[in-house]
Amino acid sequence: MAIERTFSIIKPDATRRNLTGKVNAVLEGAGLRVVAQKRILMTQAQAEAFYGVHRERGFFRDLVTFMTSGPVVVQVLEGENAVARNREVMGATDPSKAAPGTIRAQFAENIEANSVHGSDSAENAATEIAFFFSGIEIVG
Ligand code: GDP
């Protein structure tokens, strides 16, 4: 299986509850390595661009408000089959439907404040990594 990279965000509901380390422990336990990481306050423009695919959805404005409501930790994760592995360990978008042991089952507050983001394809991972990181910030 090829070593792959994916993009991850620890969302404001998780940083507010001081869960960065606990989320990282689950990621690392799943075989993913944090090869880049920084804590930022996302601007409204960044959040709107990042979630542009959801612009027409009813929850778009609320999502942008939530993602800019506090610090987030943006990350690059590396490992075998990292995109799928991370989606698996994140759990379903709605925490009430997330499998036991997943990050969202353990930590998410609700369908919006669901603690983590993870790229859903290798193509989106590359785009999302490039949105927040330059090559020299990623050390595998
Ligand atoms: P993900 O790939 O599992 O993060 O899910 P999506 O790409 O479908 O949605 C992006 C993010 O929008 C989710 O992680 C949630 O934070 C938020 N979101 C998704 N669906 C809903 C919803 O029905 N209501 C609200 N308020 N937020 C949602």
Image: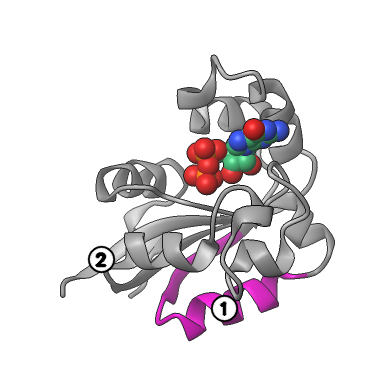
In the image, residue 22 lies in the stretch drawn in magenta: yes
Residue 139 place in picture, x, y as percent:
36, 72
Q: Identify the amino acid type marked 2.
A: Glu
Q: What mark, if any, has residue 4 been given in the picture? A: 2
Position of the C terminus by quadrant:
bottom left
Q: Residue at x 80, y 69 (%)?
A: 18
Residue 56, percent from left and from top: 54, 14
Asked if residue 5 lies left or right of residue 97, the reply is left
Q: Is residue 73 visible?
A: no
Few, some or many C-alpha atoms within 10 Å of disc 2 (few <14, some 14-19, many ≥20)?
Answer: some
Q: Is residue 20 left or right of residue 53?
A: right
Q: Secondary structure at mark 1?
A: helix
Q: From the viewer's perspective, is the residue at label 2 or at label 1 nearer? A: 1
| Residue 66: quarter of image | top right
Return the residue found at the far left. 1
* Left or right, 88 with reference to 37: left
Query: CB of mark 2 within 8 Å of CB of mark 1?
Result: no
Residue 88 found in image quarter: bottom left
Q: Is residue 53 above or below residue 8?
A: above
The three-letter code of the residue at mark 1 reads Val
Residue 111 highlighted magenta (yes or no): no
Q: Residue furthest bottom?
A: 29
Q: Return the residue at label 1.
A: 26
Question: Is residue 7 depicted above or below 36 in this figure?
Answer: above
Q: Where is the N terminus found, in terms of image quarters?
A: bottom left
* Mark drawn on residue 34: none
SS at circle 2: strand
Q: Which residues are magenta?
A: 19-38
